[in-house]
Amino acid sequence: MNITGSASAPAATSPGSADHRPPGAERGLAGRRLALSPSRAADFRQCPLLYRYRAIDRFPEQPTPAQTRGHVVHAALENLFDMPAELRTPESAHLLVEGAWAAMCEADPTLHDTITGEDDTAFLAQTQRLITTYYTMENPTAFDAQAVEAHFEIEDDDVVLRGYIDRIDVAPTGEVRVVDYKTGRSPSEAYEAKALFQMKFYALAILRRHGVVPHRLQLMYLSDGTQLHYCPDRDELERFARTLRAIWAAITSAAATGDFRPHKSSMCKFCEHKARCPEFGGTIPTYPGPPAGF
């Protein structure tokens, strides 16, 4: 199986972390219809109003230091697998962290504002510790990735699925492994299903595009060195596809009417949109309507 990725693709992001651009900027530049990504699907399941603010209004959000660190790590690991295997040493990876941070700051000098309370040296040291942990989990000089930052955009029963997969490995015997890097700590058992939602999304995309069920889904938690493995089967992925269709049907209905209702939960403490949320005394702005082409 030949799976290709984009070496120049943007680093993967955490939910909402790419949304600090002006509202509608991505819509206007891309000219694409609204699609379902793992992050946006998770947003809608968590709180439909949050989904609206991120996917339709596209209100700015300030990246957290953890999200910024995650962007740097993903960029460094992407660049690592562009190098010949024998050069993928820890020393090279640490230099790639420095290079990725410098390039990101040159492109967006405001990134320095996201690491409040830290200077570059402290920020880079913490980021490089995540890379050091990565090397305790696998040896990147021992294999080649089939694809890194692999972009997909496919239509599955009128649902457009879109996203980036951190890494896809294909064994000589043909088994496919989907790998996702996480810069936080591994979840408790109660939250494992939520973590695997994203990976099943990726597995379904590979099934639809290549007709292959990935042998293993692998989440690598670089903060504590833990790995979460899962082996899906075709029937499970077909059930997951029905779940995504149900989510999309609910999004479609809400987009047509503007009825994105807030859902209060423990996750609200992380939300930047309380001033626009009636659950916290805020006022919902006038609905701008669904994006063009929706």
Image (cartoon, helix red, strand yellow):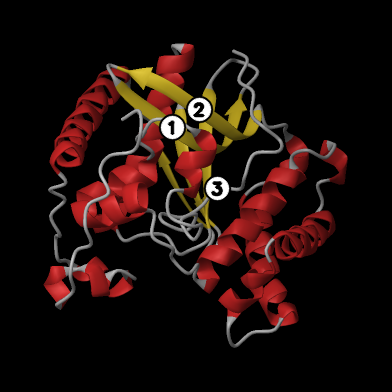
Up the image or down, 106 lies above or below 178; here it is below
On residue 152, the disc is 2
The quadrant the C terminus occupies is: top left
Name the residue that disc number 1 marks.
Answer: 162
- Residue at image position (51%, 52%) is 13
Query: In the orientation shown, which residue stands out farthest toward the bottom?
Result: 117
Task: Identify the mark nearer the N-term, 1 or 3.
Answer: 3
The answer to whether residue 174 of the structure is visible from this angle is: yes
Residue in front for this viewpoint, 98 or 226 = 98
Horizontally, residue 176 falls left or right of residue 86, namely left
Badge 3: how crowded within 10 Å, few (<14), some, or many (20+)?
A: many
Which SS class for mark 2?
A: strand
Badge 1: how crowded within 10 Å, few (<14), some, or many (20+)?
A: some
Q: Amino acid at mark 1?
A: Arg
Which SS class for mark 3?
A: loop
- Residue at image position (33%, 47%) is 56
Task: Point out residue 146 in the picture as x, y percentages from the top left corner.
Answer: 66, 26
Q: Can you tell which quarter of the image residue 271 is in?
A: bottom left
On residue 12, the disc is 3
Horizontally, residue 246 falls left or right of residue 227, namely left
The answer to whether residue 213 of the structure is visible from this angle is: no
Up the image or down, 84 lies above or below 191; here it is above
Task: Identify the mark nearer the N-term, 3 or 2.
Answer: 3
Give yes or no for contact between labels 2 and 1 (Cβ–Cβ under 8 Å): yes
Up the image or down, 7 lies above or below 272; here it is above
